[in-house]
Amino acid sequence: SYGREASKKPQIANTGVMFMDLKKFGALVPKIFNHLVEKGPFPALDQGLINNYLTQNQESRHLLPIHYNWKVYWKLEPSSFEEVKILHFHGPKVKTIHESIHICFATISFYEQ
């Protein structure tokens, strides 16, 4: 089960908060990596890969209740803060591992000065 993406409408897309059977998902991981090699890259990185694999292979997915993946930019109405279970902070994604490594080294260098 996982949550909504950019809006409150019920759309299974966001893998930022996932509730899963770890044994079952663990058994899928090698297949998901093979899918990446055969058909990747995917938009939205890991989220695109997981969504594409599950859709292509007709694996079941369920939408989490909205309060388990609440975005910080959504207004609380018609909800209250007490109803929010998981607050999902998210931001820009790095496009490649090379960029990730570069950013990491740049950050380390900055703090070593």
Image (cartoon, helix red, strand yellow):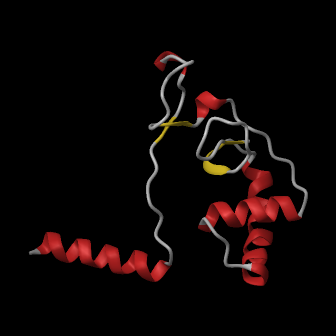
88 vs 99: above or below: above
> At 76% from the left edge and 55% from the top edge, which residue is drawn?
25
Q: Residue furthest left?
A: 113
Q: Is residue 72 left or right of residue 68?
A: left
> At 72% from the left edge and 61% from the top edge, which residue is drawn?
50
55 vs 87: above or below: below
Residue 54 or 29: which is nearer the viewer? 54
Residue 62 position, x and y percent, is 79, 40
Residue 95 position, x and y percent, is 50, 74
Residue 48 or 111: which is nearer the viewer? 48
> At 35% from the left edge and 80% from the top edge, which residue is drawn?
102
> At 74% from the left edge and 65% from the top edge, which residue is drawn?
29
Q: Is residue 72 left or right of residue 41?
A: left
Residue 79 or 65: which is nearer the viewer? 79
Viewport quadrant of the N terminus: top right
Q: Quadrant of residue 107?
A: bottom left
103 vs 47: above or below: below
Number of marks in picture? 0
Viewport quadrant of the C terminus: bottom left
